[in-house]
Amino acid sequence: MNQRGGRHGFDRVGLLKDLRGGLLDGGLAVAVTSVVFGWLYIRVRAGTSPTIAVMPFLADADTYRLYWLCQAFGWSALLWSWLTVVLGLLVSGGGPRRLPVAGARLERWHRATSLNALVLMFAHAFLFFAEEARDNQENLGWPGRLGAAFVKAFVPGGYASGTGAVAILIGLVAFYLAIPLGLAFYLRRRIGTKAWRVLHRFVIVIYALSVWHTLLYGTNVWYDGPFRTLVWLLQVPIAVLLLARMVAPARASERLPTTGRLAWVAARAAVAATIVALVAVVVTGRDGGRIPGAVSAPLNTTAEMVWGGLALLLLLMAAAVRGARS
């Protein structure tokens, strides 16, 4: 076994190198999180946050500082997830013929933002855990309150009230899938480069789950409006780059014919339709979300549906990896 963890082992040296290379990016993420926290805090103090329209008790910004810090890390985690997906699609797709940055540097940025997105996601979940432990509505002792908070924040299905019963489950599914998919790059010697590339494509599903989690439980975007529209607007370049990646991947071996493969053509058509839908939402500013003063429609997704979808996704991932290794 050599210092890189063995020919078929975990690339520890590569991971440590990427972690060191991502320190500046991580510092920027913390700075962005601080700005977002300040903005959220000021809006609460001014009484202009849409969150307190639904949950008035959160209007005490100082008492619920951990909650707002949790929200800030959630937004920076989503932003870094967006960045790493964009960079990944630029690297793996045909992309513009002339990019201002070399492909190798884009790859390094992609790995750095990917690792920092994982850290930000964990910070988001941990601060939610800390707020639940601090709030202690059940009047438990410290062991009890820590255990209850851990279940709510880190155990899928452990949060069982309101919108969070589905939204937090979706967020945790995204988080726990992001860890192995994000770190699989450093196991490519063990699973095989081809299998890793196939597996890594499922990252786009994790990103979609993260956006879904935000729209369901990101209290600052519960209502239709400019901020919610901005979230949808950011998805347009993702969808465009994904379609470009499917039509003209960077590797010639992945270029499939436009006709003759029904599933592949259907996938391209689905992404194209998604782009049209995203543009429509951005232009109209309406996506069927909550409207101030109106009775909100019940969730059309249940926890059982999420679990079923997860099982199907895992089966697809396993089948894809097995096909790549056969």
Image (cartoon, helix red, strand yellow):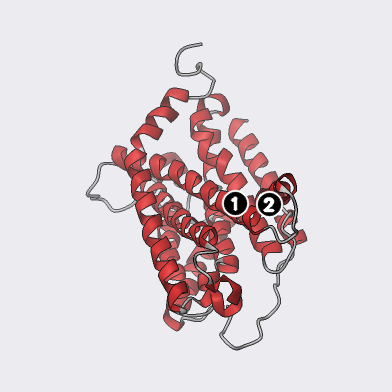
Q: Amino acid at mark 1?
A: Ala
Name the residue beneath numbered marker 1.
130
Percent of width and height locating residue 251: 40, 41
Q: Mark 2 vs mark 1: which is more N-terminal? A: 1
As helix, strand or loop, the secondary structure at mark 2 comes to: helix
Position of 55 compared to 238: left or right? right
Percent of width and height locating residue 262: 59, 57
Placement of 54 over or under 301, stated as above or below: below
Q: Amino acid at mark 2?
A: Ala
Q: Is there a contact, CB below 8 Å, between mark 2 and mark 1?
A: yes
Determine if residue 203 is in view.
no
Name the residue beneath numbered marker 2.
149
Percent of width and height locating residue 39: 39, 67
Q: Tell which of 289 and 37 is nearer to you.
A: 37
Q: Residues within 10 Å of mark 2 (few under 14, many from 20)?
A: many
Q: Seen from this angle, which residue lies furthest top?
A: 1
Placement of 154 over or under 70, stated as above or below: above
Instruction: Please name the residue shown 50% across and 64% down the image.
Output: 62
